[in-house]
Image: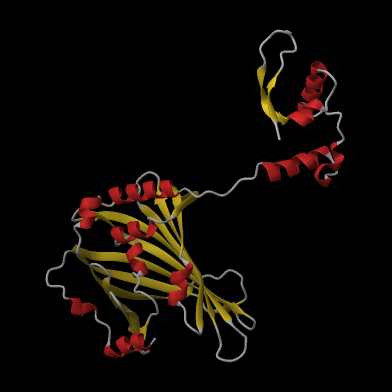
Amino acid sequence: MVMRKLCPNLDKEDGLETISEVPILEEMYTNMGNNVALRWQNMRALMKAQSAFDKSTHLQAKSDNEFLALLKIVGAPLIPFQETSTAKYIVQQYVAATGGHLELSSVRSMYAVGQVKMQGSEMQQGDGSVHARGNCEVGGFVLWQKNPDLWYLELVVSGFKVSAGSDGKVAWNQSSSQPGHANRGPPRPLRRFFQGLDPRCTASLFLDAVCIGEQTINKEDCFILKLETSSNALKAQSSAQTEIIHHTIWGYFSQRTGLLIKFEDKKLVQMKPSKGNDSAFWETTMESLLQDYIYIDGINIAHSGKTITTLYRYGKSHNYKMKIEESCSIDEVDFNICGLSNETFLPLTDLKREQQEQ
């Protein structure tokens, strides 16, 4: 197959040939006439969409416009390309905005105390919109963290207590009215860290993200970083009765300040019954808006925020939705706590045994 790239000078017989804008097949060129001048006149007419050829049968198209549309689809399609280099630049700006690499890397442990106010809707049937109503429940939390993967949370709301933690090997949770539970898979950080409390953890999370666009959040123009949890990680967290289908995370970073303005994630879990095929699906969507960034010992920490959680349960005989809204404020933050022992983060003995049996 020979491509013709040069066009003869039709105005001057001994003039230099010029480069054709579009290379054409030599066979196509020779079939357009019995001399050079006629061939290039026909070619010029073809490029002006006035060809003497009947294109109505090209690619089974019914018209010239349809043929051109098909040509665009087949000849010049686009592949979605997500900019990882842009994402890394955004994360670098975030690290700088929250104190810088040297300051953040100097943190070995942290402690935070905060207040929460929660309001929820009833579990409503159907997939329509839901609104949080009713009494506002008030409570507080204390959070401890130590490098690399140790953390412990105590949350008390309206007299009910929830504890959760990780000793670097086992992640667990328990409540005042329910027995403890060890989470499957490798230990994972607490979501509350990404609500402006731990810039190091946030930066590490989004290093492998991709930039998917821009959006305005609370009058701030933001870059959007997106992260999909790997299939191997989802499989490690699943069990025979519970399958995590996907877990997607978004971060909205201010173009002006570099700070994280909104943190969002969506998780879909399939609950499999012990008998039958009537599975239920739980879709959890959480959106956190972060505000009031204040420097503490050189590290920029968000001191207030609001999180909206939507729980959607659906399946063959299930179709319910509810919403919970939480307002949070931070009263105290400190870093590099002296005397913080690893024993603070140990799970209960029965939780250790449960993890070993899995």
Q: Does residue 318 lie above or below 29 as drawn?
A: below
Location of residue 168 in the rendering, given as x and y in whole percent from the top left corner? 28, 74
Q: In which quarter of the image is the C terminus?
A: bottom left
Q: Quadrant of the N terminus?
A: top right
Location of residue 314 in the rendering, given as x and y in whole percent from the top left corner? 59, 77
Q: Does residue 125 lie above or below 350 as drawn?
A: above
Count the labels in the image: 0
Q: Is residue 40 left or right of residue 177?
A: right
Residue farthest front in this picture: 1
Residue 154: in sight, yes or no? no
Q: In this view, does 258 lie to the left or right of 109?
A: right
Residue farthest left in this picture: 339
Residue at 35% x, 75% y: name it: 138
Q: Does residue 44 lie above or below 231 as drawn?
A: above
Q: Does residue 46 lie above or below 266 as drawn?
A: above
Is 356 in front, or is 164? Answer: 356
Is 150 in front, or is 304? Answer: 150
Q: In this view, does 118 lie to the left or right of 41?
A: left
Location of residue 68 in the rendering, given as x and y in whole percent from the top left corner? 76, 39
Residue at 34% x, 86% y: name it: 356
Residue at 37% x, 43% y: name it: 256
Asked where in the image residue 296 lies, by quadrant, the reply is: bottom left
